[in-house]
Structure formats: structure tokens, C-alpha cells
Amino acid sequence: MRSTNLVIFTASPEFAQVALNEFQVVDRQSKFRQWLDPGIGLIEVSIPFLHLASQITLTRTAFIRHICPVMEIMSIENLQSTIVAHIPMFDRTQTLSVQIRSNTKDINRAELRNLIVDDLVGFKVEAKDPVQIISIFCTKETAYFGFSNAVENLSNWAGGMHRFAHEADQISRAEFKLLEAIDVFNLQLPTEGLGLDLGASPGGWTRVLRNRGLSVVAVDPGDLAESLRSDPNITHCRQLVQQYLPNCRDRFDLIVNDMRMSPVDSAKNMIAASEVLKENGLAIMTLKLPSKGVKNVINHAIALLENHYEVIGIRNLFHNRQEVTLVMQVL
């Protein structure tokens, strides 16, 4: 059965309803169909899928993490033949990924993927950084199939679930948040210069910045991980951010902030930090969210920040929990 502008969207299960509300701002004519799984919804839209991602970005949604089109709905038994029938749509000169998700253990996704890949002889089938994506969602008896360019899906990972390998010298899982932000927002960070890490302890984000070539001033009364203490390109200031910034004489190419504090207080710290950020410098921060009224809290914090920054991205990332990540450029 051919679908009529159906889209599968993905959000954190905790923020699924917020994401649905965002979708209805993006497209007031959209009609929600059903939840396929916690955080995974099926919705009918009036906007062509080709333009949907740009519209989502334009309306500054934070909780819609991933979208993919539904071109056809069929029985599991007919999935393989349906994909074969669509092969003329695929570009053999560009990389292609087959992404399969399911809400049941009855589906062996690895086996199903291998069957599909066997039919894609001559295609550059790659899981990492694909240009084209075949998206499949399976229930026990039904398959939803779609095909799109990766840039149209908001994320080139299935369901927006970015995965990073654990590194031997990794300090904390918080590093994944910064790595994901760099990837999702396609950030071109400076590879030299000076970075400022506010609330740095134990130093996960400091390590990420050092690995990218920046020298770092790490501000936190707490300790840094032992592996960072002997690095001559890390300066540890054992102060509160509120104590450090008024007396800071350095100017920074990049400022990051993953502090655990209220969104308004964190925004105020970033406003103060804007004074020590170089022209066109980037700032990356997380906003810790309450259990209720999250959109109002986010909007209030952004209203404060926009007097000093241009907010160029906001997202509840896969590695975020009860928080969103903001990327900003100083005015």
C-alpha cells in the first residue's frame, strides 16, 4: 500500500509528547496516526518530505531527533520484493545505508538486512556517513519502507541514535554529548587556539577539545581526571565560574558549558562568558530541564541568550538525558 505523506519521527520517550507538539507547530495540518514504539511516532504531513527537515530547523524544534519517509506499507513477506522494485530510485554512485528498526523481537534485523543487501549488488552499501538511506520499521506483521537522502532525515543514524566507540582514555560518557553535537550540527571547530570549559570537572569535554588541538582553560573547583593534570596545554582554575569570569583577561575561540544548574542561571553564566569570546566564536552548552514545562523553560533561556548570541542549533540529542544542547555564535 502506498502511503500519503506519512513520516516516522523519533524522539526521546520522555519527550515524545513534546516532540509531537513541536510537529504540529512545524505543520499545522499534520495528523498524528499512532505510536509505533515509545518515542517513535507515525504522522501524516502536508509538507513534502524533501522540505520537512529545513522546516523543522527553521521553526527551531528541539525534540524531533530523526525523521524518515514512509513510501509504502506492506507485509513483512513482501518487503524484499518492494525494495527490489524501488532499486531504480537509488544512485549507484553514492553510498547507501540500510537502516532497520523494529518494535518486536520476532524480527531478526541482522538477517533481514543481509537479505536486502544481497539484492543491492553494485551499490556502495555503508553504515557510516551514508548519502542515501533505506529506512525500514517492522512490527510483527507489517513493514514501513522509505528512501531518502541522509540530509533529509535530520540524522544519518537510525532513529538519530548516534553511537561512539568507548576509548581507553575516555574520562566520562559526557564526552559523547559533545561529540554528538559536533556531528549533528556539522560544526567546524577550531583546531588551534584557546577553549574555555565552564564547570569542567572531571574533564570529559576538556579532553575532547584537547584532542582537537585546542589549549583549554578548565574552570571548576573540583578535580580533573589524573590523565589531564600533567598536560601543559590545560590550565585548571579551581574557581566557581561566577568568580572566574569577572577577572578573566583571556579571549577564547570556543566556550563549552555542561554545568548542572538551572537553565536561567546557566544562561546568565554564558551571557557573562560572551564578553571573553572572540568575534564569531562558537559556544556549546547544555540546558538541564525540569520535568514539566520544558518548552517554556527553554524559550525563556533562549530569550536571555539571544541578546548576546545567535542560536544556530538546539536539540535533545541521543546522549542527552533530561537536557538539550545549544550551539551559539557570539554577536
Image (spheres, rainbow, N blue to C red):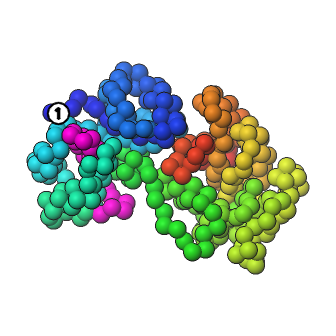
**Residue 31 vs residue 55, the one in the foreground:** 31
Which quadrant of the figure has residue 261? top right
Residue at the outermost top position: 29
Q: In this view, does 15 lie to the left or right of 31?
A: right
In the rendered image, residue 179 lying in the magenta stretch gets the answer no
- Highlighted range, magenta: 126-148
Q: Tell me the kind of residue under disc 1.
A: Arg
The residue labelled by disc 1 is 2
Q: Nearer the viewer, residue 232 or 1?
A: 1
Relative height, residue 295 to residue 145 (above, below): above
Please determine whether, in this image, residue 224 is positioned above or below residue 274. Answer: below
* Image location (x, y in percent) of residue 303: 67, 32
Give the quarter of the figure containing the C terminus: top right
Residue under the point 48% across and 52% down: 184
Foreground residue among 227 and 302: 227
Residue at 62% over, 28% down:
293
The reply to whether residue 9 is visible in this rendering is no
Q: Main secondary structure of the magenta part?
A: strand
Image location (x, y in percent) of residue 40 = 39, 38
Can residue 108 be seen in the rendering of this structure? yes
Viewer-proximal residue, 16 or 296? 16
Crowd class of label 1 (few under 14; some 14 to 19; many from 20; radius 10 Å): few
